[in-house]
């Protein structure tokens, strides 16, 4: 049992799109689809669902830090919640708790985008299935995805093109702050000082520091892809009204 919690894990390297990884993605996608399929049945249960989801995300992240402490592996250099996905998890809890549309406008793009990237190309090294960190990572990131979609389904929150560009600006300003924190701590939060592990999307985007430009373009394109269903729906509704 201990080997499933060891910080210096001796498990095999995480293999992207292995059977375990595909099944995990399938579970997250299935739950996401169920939110839309049974959206009418959420009436009267919205409070319970959003508090439960917020609690799960919060506990997953608290357990992560407790695990690091128990393994004597917590440090300011590696464990501060400064990754965009860490920030998104915290904001997801606040968003669900407060039903904040303002936070949703940022989370739909930056939170959902970073969570999807972390689910599809996780940086897990030897923390493969069934290590504790494997479950913690997918519960936390999957929870962020579900939190954003829940706000769309349950409270009719809708992202705007303005919030897309505001989110791009906020992420860039946040990255600038994190860059100077990295310089101070000799850390690598948001992978700004060097590339991440072998399976992440950064390995396809060129050498440091040129991948900054590639990441910027990927971020903007992914934000537009996330916005596209709402843009198409609005265009369709306008055309329908015109006729």
Image (cartoon, helix red, strand yellow):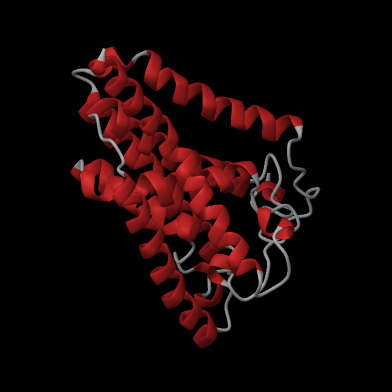
Q: Position of residue 148 (x, y in %)?
A: 36, 38
Quadrant of the rendered structure where residue 208 is? bottom right
- For residue 107, say whether it is visible: yes
Q: Position of residue 231 (x, y in %)?
A: 37, 33
Q: Quadrant of the N terminus?
A: top right
Q: Which residue is depicted at the point 43% across and 67% down?
A: 172
Please give left or right for residue 219 compared with residue 149 in the image: right
Query: From the viewer's perspective, is 42 left or right of 10?
Result: left
Q: How many marks?
A: 0
- Residue projecting furthest to the bottom: 184
Q: Quadrant of the C terminus?
A: top left
Instruction: Using the image as rendered, state which of residue 157 and residue 74 is in the foreground.
Output: 157
Res 106 seen here:
no
In-front residue for pair 209/124:
209
Furthest residue toward front: 243
Tell which of 71 and 136 is nearer to you: 136
**At x 31% / y 20%, what residue is drawn?**
239
Above or below, 83 against 124 in this view is: below
Q: What is the quadrant of residue 100 in the picture?
A: top left
The percent coordinates of residue 29 (x first, y second) are 53, 27
- Above or below, 165 against 24 in this view is below
Q: Residue at x 69, y 51 (%)?
A: 127
- Where residue 174 sits: x, y (%)? 40, 69
Q: Residue at the spot x=53%, y=42% of the render?
A: 116
- Is 12 situated left or right of 66 in this image? right
């Amino acid at each position: 049992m201990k080997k499933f919690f060891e910080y210096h894990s001796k498990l095999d390297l995480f293999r992207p799109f292995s059977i375990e990884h595909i099944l995990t993605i399938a579970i997250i996608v299935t739950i996401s689809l169920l939110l839309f399929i049974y959206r009418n049945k959420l009436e009267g249960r919205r409070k319970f669902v959003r508090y439960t989801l917020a609690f799960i995300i919060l506990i997953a992240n608290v357990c992560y830090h407790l695990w690091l402490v128990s393994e004597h592996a917590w440090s300011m250099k590696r464990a501060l919640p400064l990754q965009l996905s860490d920030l998104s998890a915290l904001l997801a809890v606040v968003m669900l708790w407060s039903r904040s549309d303002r936070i949703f406008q940022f989370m739909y793009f930056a939170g959902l985008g970073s969570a999807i990237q972390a689910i599809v190309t996780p940086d897990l090294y030897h923390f493969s299935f069934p290590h504790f960190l494997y479950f913690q990572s997918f519960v936390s990131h999957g929870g962020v995805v579900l939190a954003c979609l829940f706000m769309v389904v349950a409270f009719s929150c809708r992202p705007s093109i303005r919030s897309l560009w505001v989110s791009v600006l906020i992420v860039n300003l946040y990255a600038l702050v994190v860059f100077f924190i990295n310089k101070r701590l000799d850390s690598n939060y948001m992978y700004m000082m060097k590339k991440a592990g072998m399976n992440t999307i950064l390995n396809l985007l060129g050498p440091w520091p040129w991948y900054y430009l590639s990441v910027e373009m990927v971020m903007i394109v992914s934000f537009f892809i996330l916005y596209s269903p709402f843009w198409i729906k609005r265009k369709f509704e306008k055309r329908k009204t015109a006729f």
